[in-house]
Image (cartoon, grey):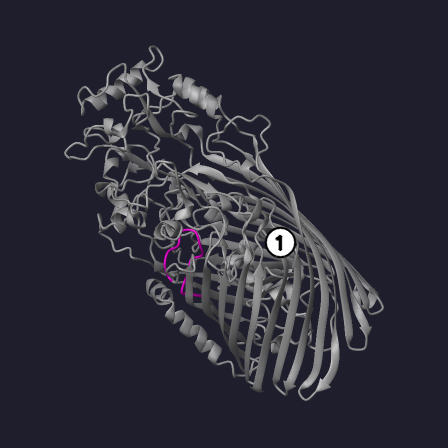
Amino acid sequence: MTSLKTLLISGTAFTALTCLFAGTGFAQTTQEAATPTGAATPLIGAGESSAKTDSADILVTGSRIKQNPNDSALPLQVITVKELQRNSISSPEQLIAFLTDNGSSADNLASNSDVVTSERRGNNGASFANLRGQGSAATLVLLNGRRVAAQGTTGSAVDVNQIPFAALDRVEVLKDGASAIYGTDAVGGVINFITKKNYRGFGATAFTDVTEKGDAPIYRLSAIAGFGDLDKQGFNVMGTVSYSWISPLEAHSRSFVNTFQHDRGLGVDTRGTPFATIVNLAGTSFATSSAFPLIPGTTVRATGGINALRLPGQAGCNAVPDQDIYDTDVWGAPGNGLACSYDTGKNVYLQQQLNTLTYLGRAVKRFGEHEIALEITGSSADSVKRFSPVQITPNTTTQNYKYARIAGVNDVAFDNLVSRINSVFPGLLNSNSTFSYRWRCVECGEREISTTTTTFRAALNATGPLFKGWDYSAGISYADSISASTLGTGYYYQDALVAALNSGAVNPFLFPGQTQSAAGMAAIQSASAQGVVLYGGKYSVKQGDASVSGSLFDIWGGTVKLATGVDFRREEYKFNGDQRAVQRTIIAAPFDNGNALNGVHRDIKAVYAELLVPIFKGFELTLAGRLDDYSGFGTTTNPKISLKYRPFKPIMFRGSYNTAFRVPSFNQIFNPDTDSVYTGSDFADPKNCPNGTVNAANGCPSLNNNVNIRNGGNLALGPETATMFSGGVVFEPSRHFSATADFWSINRNNTIQVLPLQYLFANYSIFQDRFIRDSSGKLTVIDQTYANAGNTKTQAVDFTVRGSIDALGGSFGAGLDGTLLLKKEEKVNASAATIQQLGVYSLASDLGLRWKHNAFVSYSNDDFSVSLTQIFRSGYKNQVLPGVLAGTFNPSNDITDVADYIYYNLSASYNGIKGFKLTFGVRNLFDTNPPFAISYDSNNGSGSSWEPRVADPRGRSFTMQAEVKF
């Protein structure tokens, strides 16, 4: 087993094996091989019509003209239910992560597991698509060819978890810009979830996915029923319902989660620990940081405070669970040499609890050749986000708490603490001393936010012939997404908790073996804010559209075809940033009252046309264009030119050029400014310190707790624009084998973004206006509001290979989907230096992984099938924390690069009994842990020793799916 594992994990061997099978596709086979798109020809089109055509021409995602998907100029990947089952994919989020063309950004639930920045604060329970790494707002998500509403609290992108996954027939992924057809948000591409149509009978499915460790199970139950034969009886009614349970996965249960790895240059930047750290505060015995003593054996003053456990002769920081020394080397902060830290990354849930109900109902009636369809879909999702206990930090205004000796209440605990500190620093404290502290209130319990999101969508569609060779399609639809979040455990009213701390009943200095008293626990719980409604939002889309398509006339190469249409929609959004009945401050609660929007809307009116011209035999040119009128932004015209050339049957060349225009989201425009204290330790004032590098010895102390970060919208934001190009080749020597390679390039200008702090500091001369100072020149605020900033350039090549042969009484198949990223760079300003993002760590944006692929080999006969899939994600340059970056510390372990992430899925299915199918699977066959990666974010405390944007933390798991149909 070990030698086999070593061979397979090399990646190269597996890919070579895949290509070997694919290359033998010239042999005769009883199984039709995959088309260039990666799936068998769909029976029905990408829209809502259930009609079949006599020819092979149907509507495919990305075009309004019916055509043969096997002979299309579009780089379209079709993912069937069979492929989903082969990889035990049980949710839309898992599907999105599976796509090699999807970016590696913080769009999944694991990336939102701790404290996050304001722009991701409302993502609770939501997951987003991010084709070509252009951002979730630049990927258009469709359901049966029509729009669905953006997620209710964020109002910027569609939560894919609302898709009725159990009803899917297939997923069409257009890996090309499609603004000329669908609108301005199809920059990165289009994902069209297409459900079953004209279903008859009854079916039920049960699915389970349980880890080898026995934790965090995933379950799904679904049923589908339909009656009426559309072709014979002229009608069909069908419905599906599904319920899934995703259980939470604790970080404590995974050994690879460990943020205390000194030899690898990783440590935690927080002095808020379960055993409190004494810090300076005006009005206490340590009014300033200079009042602290020298660290024993050094000439360095303990400006970061004192944690008694770290003093000589004491038990040590790690005597308390999940606590260890503050790593002064890693952070280049020698003044914190008497402080401890707390592993926040080990105190989150790597898989959030999410229970989801989805449903779909569809009724279709034919009147002659005309067809009217009504479709209703919806979902209800309940998520629970649990993460590290709250850190309490003192100040002289709102959180002015002190630890003082109170006779009969805490005198014994106080005297014990003073005695231990004075044993190292004689006379430093006495019975009249007072001091403040930073404390991680473990007794407060883990923080919890519960979110309920409901969606609804109704669409009425009519299709049919107009006259010979011409068809029409018209429809109206309404969709909305409504979300609301509520505080659970771990949140406390500020005034009540400060009073409890000042009462002396609560002891934040519990030495090993001690526990909080009943009085202390009662005092803490009396301040609980559990049950307070946090915030909520609603996003809705009303849409009406109509189009006609058909043949114009014949020329040398064939028939000229035209499609044209109109589209109107209204998008509405409102956000209740703070729904507290009583306006009492709750510590660390992520209220967004400053971002409240009572209700804003925009109208979009559009006309479009698409013309297919067969210039000569084998050569087709398609011209498309769309004129959009956005209320508040005016009009924009976006053309698209695509072509294909088949000089002879086995070879086809294809290419396209198009432009795009994306307007800001409502939040990006209208959110008011809000300020929050910067709590990180990795930046100094860039006016005096080059690139804002922290070096206290040279007069460049950290800005920790001394400046505010300002977030919010920008009424002056303009749209971002993009130009896109693609060119590729399709090789089909026989119907049993196909291979494609498509180069693509996207250049975006005036990109709408929150500029990461490291960009602002590194480009201080350009962004001086974003560093706000008081009259004395002291830095007080860093403006991180939305901006149209610079441009991005992304280039890559997508590969697809499919093939099959007959042998051993069945059929062997193999395939590969891969994306090779060639360029990923950004300029935050026209005069700024180019930032290379290919194969390097990025804190806030998409990770530019050079190579991703999914490769499989399979065998199937009439009753049985088995497959092995390799998932490969290449490594990248690791993050480097401040002390290492400054050269004050060199880790003993070479952690320059994050290793490749490679794992395998094995599945086997049996369908030898009519109406019954059983599928077993093993995900992550060799139980491969995510590679070590420094993902820690000091400003938010999130992240740890692995990268949730790339890896799956579950480990080896076993899946089973049973399907019945009659």
Q: How many marks?
A: 1
Q: Is residue 828 visible?
A: yes
Closest to the observer: 638 or 687?
687
User: Which element type, helix, strand or loop, lies under badge 1?
Assistant: loop
Q: Position of residue 727 (x, y in %)?
A: 51, 76
Q: Is residue 247 visible?
A: no
Magenta range is 839-852
Identify whether 525 is placed above or below 95: above
* Residue at the image point whose x is 74% and y is 78% from the top: 551
Q: What residue sits right under mark 1 in the picture? A: 163
* Residue at the image point whose x is 44% and y is 31% from the top: 445
Farthest left residue in view: 297
Identify whether 142 is placed above or below 151: below
Identify whether 222 is placed above or below 796: above
Is 456 covered by the magenta stretch?
no
Q: Is residue 601 left or right of residue 275?
A: right
Q: Position of residue 331 (x, y in %)?
A: 28, 44
Location of the N terminus (image quadrant):
bottom left
Closest to the observer: 332 or 222?
332
Farthest front residue in view: 775
Q: Position of residue 853 (x, y in %)?
A: 45, 66
* Residue at the image point whose x is 34% and y is 20% from the top: 403
Q: Is residue 429 left or right of residue 183?
A: left
Q: Is residue 373 left or right of residue 803?
A: right
Q: Position of residue 240 (x, y in %)?
A: 69, 53
Identify whether 191 is placed above or below 385: below
Q: Are there few (<14), some (14-19), or many (20+) residues within 10 Å of tag 1?
A: many
